[in-house]
Image (cartoon, rainbow, N blue to C red):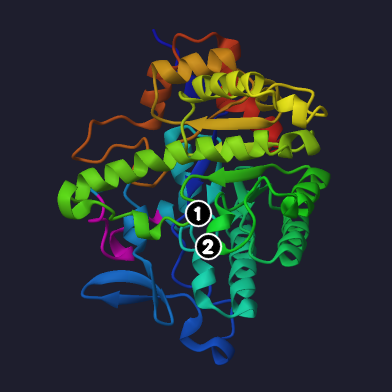
Amino acid sequence: MATDLFETYKVVDVDTHLTEPPDVWTARMSQAKWGDLVPHVVNKRGVDVWVAGNNRIGSPGSSAMAGWDGFVPNGPPTFEQIHPSMYDSHERLAWLDREGIWAQVLYPNVGGFGSAFFLQLGDADLMLECVRTYNDFLIDWCSADPRRLIPVMSTPFWDLDACVAEIERSVANGHRAVNFCNQPEHYGVPPLAHPHWDPVWAAAQDLGVPISFHIGGGDIGRKVSEGADFMGVQPAFARFSALLIVDNQRCLAELIFGGVCHRFPRLKFVSVESGVGWMPGVIEVFDWQWRNSGVTRDRPEYDLLPSEYFRRQIHGCFWFEDVAARHAIEQYPDNMLYETDYPHPTCQYPSPPTPARFPRDYANDALAALSPELQRKVLHDNAARLYQLD
C-alpha cells in the first residue's frame, strides 16, 4: 500500500490566503474620521464588492474559488456562497483537520499581494492605518490556534521609516514573516536592489523573520485583462497567471545581482506561489552570466556564486508541478517548500470543471518517488525551520 504522506508528516502549507471578512476595517477604524474611505463591502447587482471611497478593490469571490463550479472571473457572488473556511479561522482549522494539514502560512487578498492597493487612497495616514489594521486583524484571526495559523504581515513600503517601524511592531505582536512589494519601482520608489531598502532588510534580519515576495506583489491591476479583447477572457487570464510566475525570476535576480543576499547573509527570502521547477535552470543561467560577465571585477566582495547565495538564503514554493518539482527538490533539498494556494483560482483543490485532485492526492503522487528524508524536508522540516514552528 502506498504511503499517505499527510498521515506520515505534519504538513506545513506555506502559501494560503484568507478571504478577509467584511468587517476587517469597519470594525477597527474610525468611520467618523474616514467615512466611506474605510474599506468595506457593498453589494452591486447581486455581487459583493470591496470598495473604499470611489475605488473598487475587487470581489471576494474571485479569490475564493476552491470547490466552485466555474472559472475566474465568475466566482461565488456573495459571502453566503463562500465556504466559511475561507474567512473564519475556526472553520479553517476544521478544514485543515479534514485535509490532514498541520499548519498554514497566510497571505492577504484585499490590499493586494504587496499592499499596493492602499496607495490609491491618497492620504498617507489613511494608507498606514489600513495596513496596520490588517496586520492587527490577522493576529486576532490566527489566535484561534497560533501554532497552526501563521501570520505574514503587510508593509507600507512607500514610507521607509513607517515600513521599518511596522515590521518591528508586527513581529513583536506575533507575525512570522514580512510580505513585501516585489516591484516597488512601479510606485515611485527605488527597485529592490537599491541600498534604499537596506534598513528593511536589516530589520528583518535582526528580528529573524523571512521576507516574502508573493507573485503579483507589484502593479498587476492593469495587466489582468490585457489582451482579453483578442485572446478571449480565459486565455488572457491564463497568460497573466503564468507571467506572474515568470516575473519572480526577475525578483530573484534583483536580490542576488544587486548584492542584497551578500549584504544580509542571515536574511531568508521566499518566492511565493511561483513554483520551483524553473529555479534550477534560472540559477544555472545566473551562474553562467555571473562568470561570463566578470561580476567580481566590479564587486570583488561578492564571494559566492548565485547558486550559493540561493542555497544559503532563498526558498521556493510548489503546489502543481510533478517532474519539475522533483528535479528542483533533488538539487536544492533545503530550499523547497510545499503550498496549496488555498482557496485561490489556481489552488490544488478540485472544482467541478477540473480534475478532482486534492492536496493530499497531489503530494502523494508527486513526491512518492522521493526518499523519506526529502519528503520530510519539503512537507515539514524546511518550513518549520524557516517560520520557527514548534
Magenta-highlighted stretch: main secondary structure? loop
- Residue sitting at 64 percent across and 61 percent down? 157
- Residue sitting at 26 percent across and 76 percent down? 44
Residue 49 among magenta residues: no
The residue type indicated by label 1 comes to Gly
Residue 75 among magenta residues: yes
Residue 346: image tag: none
Residue 221 seen in the figure: yes
Q: Nearer the viewer, residue 388 or 153?
A: 153
- Magenta stretch? 72-84
- Position in image of residue 209 (x %, y %): 73, 44
Q: Secondary structure at mark 2?
A: helix
Relative to 386, is 115 above or below? below
Q: Quadrant of residue 352?
A: top left
Q: Nearer the viewer, residue 58 or 69?
A: 58
Residue 218: image tag: 1
Q: Would residue 175 be found to the left or right of residue 366 on screen?
A: right
Relative to 192, is 258 above or below? above
Residue with the most extreme bottom position? 32
- Label 2, label 1: how many angstroms apart (C-alpha)? 7 Å
Relative to 122, is 370 above or below? above
- Position in image of residue 365 (x %, y %): 38, 17
Q: Would residue 87 be found to the left or right of residue 304 on screen?
A: left
**Total marks drawn?**
2
The residue type indicated by label 2 comes to Ala
- Residue sitting at 74 percent across and 58 percent down? 173
Q: Which residue is label 2 attached to?
A: 116
- Position in image of residue 75 (x %, y %): 26, 56
Q: Are marks 2 and 1 in contact (CB under 8 Å)?
A: yes
Residue 70 seen in the figure: no
Q: Quadrant of the C terminus?
A: top right
